[in-house]
Amino acid sequence: MLPRFSIVTCLILAVALAGCNKSQDQAAQNQPADVSNGDPANGNLAAADQSGDQSAVPPEPAPATPDDAQDASYQQPIQASQPPPPLPVYSQPPAPGDNYIWTPGYWSYANAGYYWVPGAWILAPYVGALWTPPWWGFDDGYYHWHSGYWGQHIGYYGGINYGFGYTGRGYYGAYWNNGAVYYNRTVTNVNVSIVHNVYNYNVPNNQGSRVSFNGGRGGIDARPTAQELAAARDSRTLPGKAQVEHAREASSNRAQFAAPGGRAPAALVAPRPIATEYHAPAARPPVAAAIRTPAHSVPERPAETPRAPEIRPVPQPARQPEQVQHPAAPARPEVRREEPRPAAPPRPEPQARPQPRSAAPSRPEPQAHPQPRPAVPPRPAPKPKEEEHKEH
C-alpha cells in the first residue's frame, strides 16, 4: 500500500506544481516587464516640464544637411489647401525580430495630391531610438506637413491616433528595457516563437477616430502636453535613407494616391521590414549633436586618417636621392683616374735604367780594347828587323 500511496501523492504534487507554474507564467505575462529604461505605462513620454507653455507647438527638428539623402518632403516645407483623407484601416504584420520599431502609415503630399506611405517595421537606428510619426496641422488657411523623427522620447504628433500603440499621446506598443525592445502583445502583433521580449498592458484610449490632421474644420483638437513639450529638448534625427526611399517608392506608384470615392491605396502596409544598411542598433549617442551629425563625424575620421601621411618617411623620395647618388657619384671615374697613374710614363722611365746598365759595361770594354791594341803594334816591330836583315 505504501508504494501505491507514494506514487499517487507524487502525481498529485506534480499536477499542483504544474498548475502553480502556469499561473505564475500567466501572472508574469499580465504584469509589466522589469523596468529600467522606461515604463510601459508611461507611453515613452518624457518627464513633464511644468514651466512649458502648452499652447505652443514644439519646434521642428533640424533640417537635413546636404550630406543626407533626404526626400524633398523632409527638406522643404509642404502645405496643401485641402486636408488629407481619413486614415485607412489595416492589419499590422508581425514583428520580424528583436529591436524593430513600428512606423505607422501616413499620408504624404505631392503635386498630384495625397499618397499613402505604407506602415512598416524598421530596425531601430540606435539603442533607445523611438519613432515620432509625422502629422498634418492646419494653420493660416493651409494644411502644413510636420515630419517624423527619431528621438529618445515620443514627442508631439498632433494627437493623431495611428493605432498599434500610437494613441495620439505617446507610444504604448513597445519600450526599451536594458538595451532591448519589449513588445506589448495587447496592441502589437508579435510572434512569440520569434520574439521573446513581450509583455501585456491594456492601453487606455486605444480606440480613436480616423481623422488624419490637427486643427481646422473637422480636425483633431489636441495641443501638446508638458511631457510632449519636454521631449522637444531631446536630440532628434530625421528619417534615414531607407525610410526616405520607402516613401519615394510610394510617391512613384499611382495606385498609392488618394482616389475619388474613398478607394483605399493598393498597399497599406509593407509585407517585409524596411531594409537598412545597418544590421543592429548603434550605441546610444551620448551628445545631442552627435545624433544629428553622424555624417559630419564620418568625414572627420578620414581627415584624421591622413595621419597615415605621417608615414611620409615611407614616401621613399628620401631613398630615391640615395639611388641618385649612386649613379651620379663618380666613384668609378675616380678609379679610372688612378688607372692612368700606374700607366703614366714614370714607370717606363725605370725601364730606361737598364740603358745606363748597358752603357756601364760598354765603358770598361773600350778601356780594355785600346790597351791590347797598342800591344799589337810592337809585334810588327820585328818586321823591320827582318827588313833590315833583308837589306843587309
Image (cartoon, grey):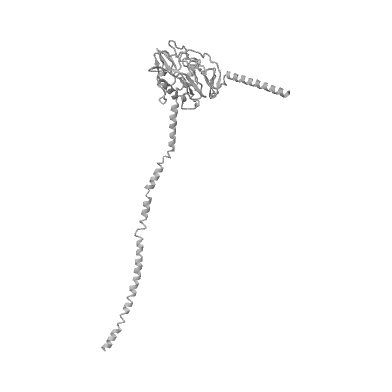
Q: Nearer the viewer, residue 12 or 301?
A: 12
Image quadrant occupied by the C terminus: bottom left
Asked where in the image residue 71 lies, by quadrant, the reply is top left
In the image: residue 193, left or right of residue 376: right
Does any portion of residue 29 appear in the rendered image? Answer: yes
Say which residue appears at 34% left-offset and 73% top-offset. Answer: 365
From the top left corner, tell me how far across and down residue 182 is, in percent.
54, 22
Q: How many marks?
A: 0
- Most extreme residue toward the left is 391
Q: Nearer the viewer, residue 43 or 292?
A: 43
- Most extreme residue toward the top is 217
Asked where in the image residue 244 lies, by quadrant, the reply is top left
Does any portion of residue 63 appear in the rendered image? Answer: no
From the top left corner, tell me how far across and down residue 133 is, in percent.
46, 18
From the top left corner, tell me how far across and down residue 83 is, in percent.
41, 13
Vertical placement of residue 335 versus 162, above or below: below
From the top left corner, tell me how far across and down residue 84 is, in percent.
42, 14
Image quadrant occupied by the N terminus: top right
Say which residue appears at 35% left-offset and 68% top-offset. Answer: 358
- Most extreme residue toward the bottom is 392
